[in-house]
Image (cartoon, rainbow, N blue to C red):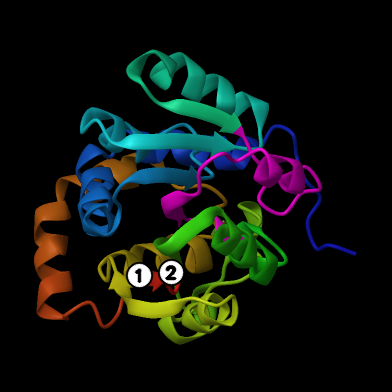
């Protein structure tokens, strides 16, 4: 039996996404981190309310946004449907995936998922299905929470099955047939806040005030990542390429 039961309305997740939506500097930092690896026909898995999607739409990328919850899809339709972004209901590991794949006219050049794979019990199936949606030579870009030792009340309330290292995420991606192009970390400064608020204070959602403060300090945190050469971070980022 699965550890978590699917919720049609994910209140904790929605509250967290809304708190993060106000952190424009943080969101653009994440976007800047993955954007160089995304090109051509792009699919975002688990777009949520579009915190990162908006930057791709702003820059007129050929992007399809997706989610499996109708309340998130409503957000996406309201904010992006009239801005040349395609929006679809997609469950990457659900029974409807085979129908979607059968009707996919042209494979994608890039598929990315930011803070999504940790919500999926069978992460191996998710990555294998992403492989099937990509053109030969296409890229997968995955960002997930790092270090199982940091698993706390945040992770539990957000229904994270696990956290990863660059090595363990790379293993899942290479196991699906991808060649690993890059594997490192993002947002080292976030570790202390995540640990203190989730492990010590036992909070279940990210306090908006804390997120606003963090957002204001992003210029400093970017420097921290550069100094540490992305060898440690609250998240790990792995880029894979489908062989030609």
Q: Quadrant of the C terminus?
A: bottom left
Q: How far is mark 1 from mark 2, CA to CA?
A: 6 Å
- Residue 47 against residue 224 in the figure, above or below: above
Task: Please report the residue visible at 31 percent of the width from the left and 74 percent of the height from the top.
Answer: 185
One can see residue 153 in this view: no
Q: Which mark is residue 59?
A: none
Q: How many marks?
A: 2
User: Image check: 156 left or right of 134?
Assistant: right
Q: Position of residue 94 (x, y in %)?
A: 76, 49
Q: Which residues are magenta?
A: 89-118
One can see residue 54 in this view: yes
Categorize mark 1 by other alpha carbons within 10 Å: few (<14), some (14-19), many (20+).
some
Residue at mark 1: 191
Q: Position of residue 49 (x, y in %)?
A: 47, 31
User: Image check: 161 left or right of 217?
Assistant: right
Q: 99 and 211: which one is in front? A: 99
Task: Please report the residue visible at 51 percent of the width from the left and 27 percent of the height from the top.
Answer: 87
Task: Please report the residue visible at 9 percent of the width from the left and 54 percent of the height from the top.
Answer: 219
Q: Position of residue 26 (x, y in %)?
A: 25, 48
- Quarter location, residue 14: top right
Q: Residue furthest right?
A: 1
User: Image check: 203 left or right of 50?
Assistant: right
User: Image check: 215 left or right of 53?
Assistant: left
Residue at mark 2: 195
Q: Nearer the viewer, mark 1 or mark 2?
A: 1
Q: Position of residue 163 (x, y in %)?
A: 54, 72
Q: 183 and 24: which one is in front? A: 183
């Amino acid at each position: 039996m699965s550890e978590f039961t699917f919720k049609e309305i994910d209140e904790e997740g929605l509250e967290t996404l809304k708190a993060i939506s106000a952190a424009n500097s943080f969101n653009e930092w994440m976007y800047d981190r993955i954007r160089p690896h995304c090109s051509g026909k792009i699919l975002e898995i688990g777009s949520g309310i579009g915190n990162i999607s908006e930057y791709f739409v702003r820059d007129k990328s050929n992007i399809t946004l997706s989610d499996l919850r109708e309340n998130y899809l409503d957000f996406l339709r309201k904010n992006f449907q009239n801005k040349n972004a395609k929006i679809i209901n997609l469950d990457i590991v659900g029974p409807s995936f085979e129908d979607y794949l059968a009707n996919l006219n042209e494979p994608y050049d890039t598929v990315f998922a930011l803070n999504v794979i940790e919500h999926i019990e069978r992460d191996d199936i998710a990555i294998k299905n992403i492989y099937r949606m990509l053109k030969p030579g296409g890229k997968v870009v995955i960002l997930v929470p790092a270090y199982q030792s940091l698993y706390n009340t945040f992770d539990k309330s957000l229904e994270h099955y696990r956290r990863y290292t660059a090595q363990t995420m790379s293993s899942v991606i290479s196991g699906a047939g991808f060649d690993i192009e890059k594997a490192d970390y993002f947002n080292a400064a976030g570790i202390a806040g995540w640990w203190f608020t989730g492990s010590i204070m036992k909070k279940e959602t990210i306090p908006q005030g804390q997120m606003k403060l963090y957002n204001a300090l992003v210029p400093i945190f970017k420097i921290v990542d550069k100094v540490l050469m992305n060898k440690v971070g609250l998240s790990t980022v792995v880029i894979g390429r489908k062989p030609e």
